[in-house]
Image (cartoon, helix red, strand yellow):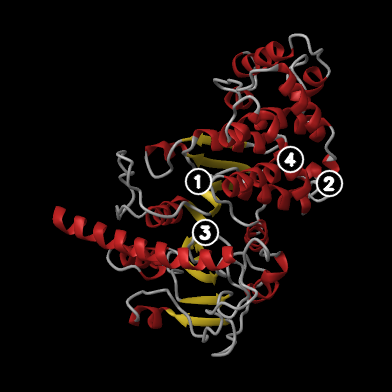
Amino acid sequence: MRHESVVQKIWSLCHILRGDGIGYHQYVSELTYLLFLKIAEENGIERLLPEGFRWNDLKDHSDDRLLSFYQEMLTYLGNHVENATIQAIYAFPTTVFSHAENLRAVIDGIAKLNWQDLTTDRFGQIYEGLIEKSSQDVRSGAGQYFTPRALVNSMVKLMKPQLGELIQDPATGSGGFLIAADRFIRSTNSQDAYNEKPPRYQGAEIEKNTRRICLMNTFLNGLDADIIYGDALTDDANTFEPASLILANPPFGSKAGSRRSLRADLPYHNANKQLVFLQHIYLALAEGGRAAVVLPDNVLFEDGVGKLVRSSLMDRCNLHTILRLPKGIFSSAGVKTNVLFFTRDKDKSQQTRAVWVYDLRTNMPAFGKTSPLKEQHFEEFEICFGDDPFGHSARKDLGDTGRFRCFSRQEIGDRGDNLDLSWLRDESETFDEKSSPDDIAAVILAHLRAAVQEMEALTNDLADDASV
């Protein structure tokens, strides 16, 4: 049974919770309380939970007063345990169960699952799967989008996180990048070496429930992680230390709606979130640090503040590689994206001299629900990138018909520091008989949202000009 089947079985329990009048969002949130206890048992982490308040204590409790015991359990874990992470996970807990019979049915359903069919990141897999199910079943969507596992793993593999490093994600989400980085480090070192010089992790998450999920995920996977509840673009990030490695897929779109002031150290204030996040990331790197960041196309070509940010990035750092990602991998968000790889070298003279671009978008198959992105799709790019996580490996320009090209800093400057670099003729922008309605709708939505983003950027620039 694949992990999709585990997710489907858990999701099927929704029919039970509906009997208690519980909606989709409440359902996912409630399930995380129970799943955390169960997976802590499966991972051997429950020794850190107080005796009497573990999974088996709940599972084996008599039906008499089961609901009362569950409520007592949530309250105790949120208020009386010594472990600060567990307290944060169960802070202000409430249960939406109204009947003990329904709680018993859900507990029994979770207990019957075959947990061996999931990888070590069990909690992350299930949570992301449940959010995806929720977005499919609710027309308005769940409001959360996750980076495809294949892309996360490729970025981590290329960046080669090391023992003792401080690794950050300023928009942590459920913690996928941090978990993958830790798994890579553990797979390339002995347990003794890991214990002697463990990596440290920092992150920020602005959405309270998602931050709780991230705390659960990092705790269950044994990470030394400090995940703040706040906005990395504000003074909330003052506790961050200079990072050895930053891995991120920051949120796209306008910062409209927030009235909090951006940090004073960010050179170029703009309502465009991704441009502000990019500034935060290249300023947050320690000397000798490196970053891999997922960003939408408009970051590469937008004028005004966009151009200033790109120029600043290339002057302060060595932007050595851009990966143009395929269309459809963020079908819910409807955007075209890229990964920017850059380093902040100790030698100040080592700013950007050339940018290598790998085009994994043009003439690629359409990715979507029926044809997901897989790790094999990144194999050729990883070979071209090379073994050096700082981008210093010997590389070969594959010419006008190849997917990997090199552009000098002079060439980019002649383009007005426009980094939207493409050269292959796209022959795949048509729909065929095999295109599903979902994939066609995703492409249409991508064009519409790209147009809206350009209009927002223009409006912001005009507002900035008016305020001068």
Q: Nearer the viewer, residue 385 or 118?
A: 118
- Alpha-carbon span between mark 3 and mark 2: 31 Å
- The first of marks 3 and 2 along the sequence is 2
- Alpha-carbon span between mark 3 and mark 4: 29 Å
- Alpha-carbon span between mark 1 and mark 2: 28 Å
- The first of marks 4 and 1 along the sequence is 1
Q: Amino acid at mark 4?
A: Glu
Tell me which residue sits at (80%, 17%) in the image: 57
- Location of residue 338 with respect to 211 vertically, above or below: below
- The first of marks 3 and 4 along the sequence is 4
Q: Secondary structure at mark 3?
A: strand
Task: Report crowding for label 3: few under 14, some 14 to 19, many 20 or more residues within 10 A (C-alpha).
Answer: many
User: Looking at the picture, how far across and down is residue 180, in whole percent?
Assistant: 68, 50
- Residue at the disc numbered 4: 196
Which numbered dot is residue 293?
Answer: 3
- Residue at the disc numbered 1: 143
- The first of marks 3 and 1 along the sequence is 1
Of labels 4 and 1, the one closer to you: 1
Q: Nearer the viewer, residue 353 or 205?
A: 205
- The first of marks 2 and 4 along the sequence is 2
Q: Is there any visible trace of residue 165 in the rendered image?
A: no
Task: Report crowding for label 1: few under 14, some 14 to 19, many 20 or more residues within 10 A (C-alpha).
Answer: few
Q: Is there any visible trace of residue 448 in the rendered image?
A: yes
- Alpha-carbon span between mark 4 and mark 1: 40 Å
- Residue at the disc numbered 2: 117
- Location of residue 336 with respect to 183 vertically, above or below: below
Q: Amino acid at mark 1?
A: Gly
Apparent side of residue 23 relative to residue 458 in the rendered image (left or right) = right
**Quarter location, residue 221:** top right
- Alpha-carbon span between mark 3 and mark 1: 21 Å
